[in-house]
Structures are given as structure tokens and as C-alpha cells.
Amino acid sequence: MVKTTGQSGRDDTGDDVVARRSAPLVLARRLRLSDQLYGQILEQIVSGRLSEGARLPSETEICKSFGVSRPVVRQALQRLRADGLVQARQGSGTYVQARPAERLADFVDPGAVSALLRCLEVRVGLEGAAARFAAERRGTRELDRIVAAHEALRVQADAGAMTAEVDFAFHVAIAEASGNGFFPRLLAELQAELRGFMALSLNLTRTGPSLRAAHVLHEHRLILDAIRGQEAEAAEIAMRFHIVQARRRMVDRNREG
């Protein structure tokens, strides 16, 4: 049964759904209000307090519960929708659509997840193009570096200890193989967010089903094979597919495999 909420921000069982009115949002130094609100709602989706199919309180109720303005609420909800976590139903409200694995909160502050997923939006275009150019322009030395990075990650996967450093090295090797120095420079600028996402993703992989690691390696192999075969379009598609799948594995526990 779908839970309903009243002005107090509680569901029909008497449990808090989003927040107690007496506990306003606490400002964090590096997170915007909308990211904090995103994280508060995400935390309750992850924990199951807001289950799949549950209706969120109205914008007005969330404003009152958290002590934030309507634009902040709308921005947070828009991002939750963009990430596939909630969906709006015309004339009905906003409902939880997907629930990440509970252990997500063990590895990251939920408030930081929004920024990590926004970084993926940039990566899709940036790294897709880098992979295309790498397939067209790579030499033997550049290909060897990509192969070595992939092999290092495979060895780690076999040992159950994949690291963000080795994963990042694979993506950097592809950017360097593009023959355009702006690609590795841009990855360097995004390094903190990239490594943050990779560390989170790999922690979820390490503690999740073994099939998850196999899928990560398979996606890397598709990229590598396309670059090795100098198939530019296939390389771009494979890279874009890999990044989109990484995002899906993070936000939806049903896609963990």
C-alpha cells in the first residue's frame, strides 16, 4: 500500500517520512542546500523508510519540514528525477521509483551523491569522444598502456580488491591515447569527483554480487577491443554504455548484477 502524508510530514502509520519539523536542515560547508536535501531524501530511500512506490510529501510539506525554500525543494526533486530515483505523476505527486543498495550509505555521505552523478553527465560526452579519438589515433605504445591498465584491474578483480586508482588509470590511458592533450587535462580537473565515484562504485562492487565485477570488466573489455580494432564509433558507444551502466548500478539495487 502506498503511504500517504499529512501536513506533519508523517505517514499514515505515524512514522516520519522525510523529516521531523523540529530538525531543520543543517548547512554543510561544501554542499548546497539542494544537494543536502537531495541527500536527506536519498538517505531515507536507501534505508527503506521511503520504499519503492511510496509517495513523497508535497513540496509545501517538504519546505516546512526542512525549513528551505520552494526553489531548493524543486531543484532537489528535479535531480532525484533525473537520476531515476523518483518519478512525478501528473495530478498525483512524486513517488519513489528506484532504491539503491542499503550499503551505499556505508561508503558515502548521501548528500555528495548528487554531485557524483552530475559528474557522470559530463563524463558521457567527454570520455565518449576521447574513446572515439583513441580508436582513430592510438599507436602501439598508447594501446599497450590501455591494455596494461585493463589487465591490472582484472588482476585486482580476481583478488576481490579493485581500486579507484587502477580504474582511473584505465580511463586516463584512453584520454592520453586520443592525441588531444585537453582530454587528460580535463580528466585531471575532474579527478576528485571521478575517483570519488569510482571508489564508491568499486566498494559497491566489492560488497555486491560477483556478477557485478564481471560486468564492469566486460564493459572495459568492449572499450579496449574497439580501440584495439580502431573502430571509432564502437569505442565511443562502448564508453558511453559503460558510464551509463555504472550510474544505473549505483542508483538501482535491482541492477546490481
Image (cartoon, grey):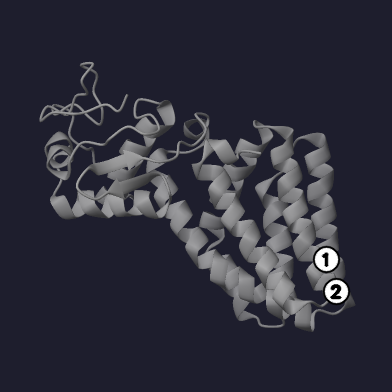
Disc number placed over residue 202 in the picture, else none: none
Dividing the picture into quadrants, the one containing residue 175 is bottom right
Looking at the rendered structure, the kind of residue marked 2 is: Gly
Q: Which residue is mark 2?
A: 229
- Give the residue pinned by disc 1: 225
Badge 2: residue crowd in 10 Å (few <14, some 14–19, many ≥20): few
Q: Kindly identify the residue that appears in the image at 28 percent across and 35 percent down.
A: 55
Q: Residue furthest top?
A: 13
Query: How much space separates mark 1 and mark 2, taking CA atoms?
Result: 6 Å
Q: Quadrant of residue 144?
A: bottom right
Asked if disc 1 and disc 2 are in contact, CB closer than 8 Å, the reply is yes
User: On the rendered image, what quadrant is the C terminus found in?
Assistant: top right
Rendered view: 180 above or below 66: below
Three-letter residue code for mark 1: Asp
Residue displayed at 89% across by 76% down: 140
Q: Position of residue 11 (x, y in %)?
A: 22, 23
- Circle 1 — which element? helix
Q: Secondary structure at mark 2?
A: loop
Residue at figure coordinates x 56%, y 56% from the top left: 194
* Residue at image coords 25%, 31%: 18
Tell whether 176 sits left or right of 229. Answer: left
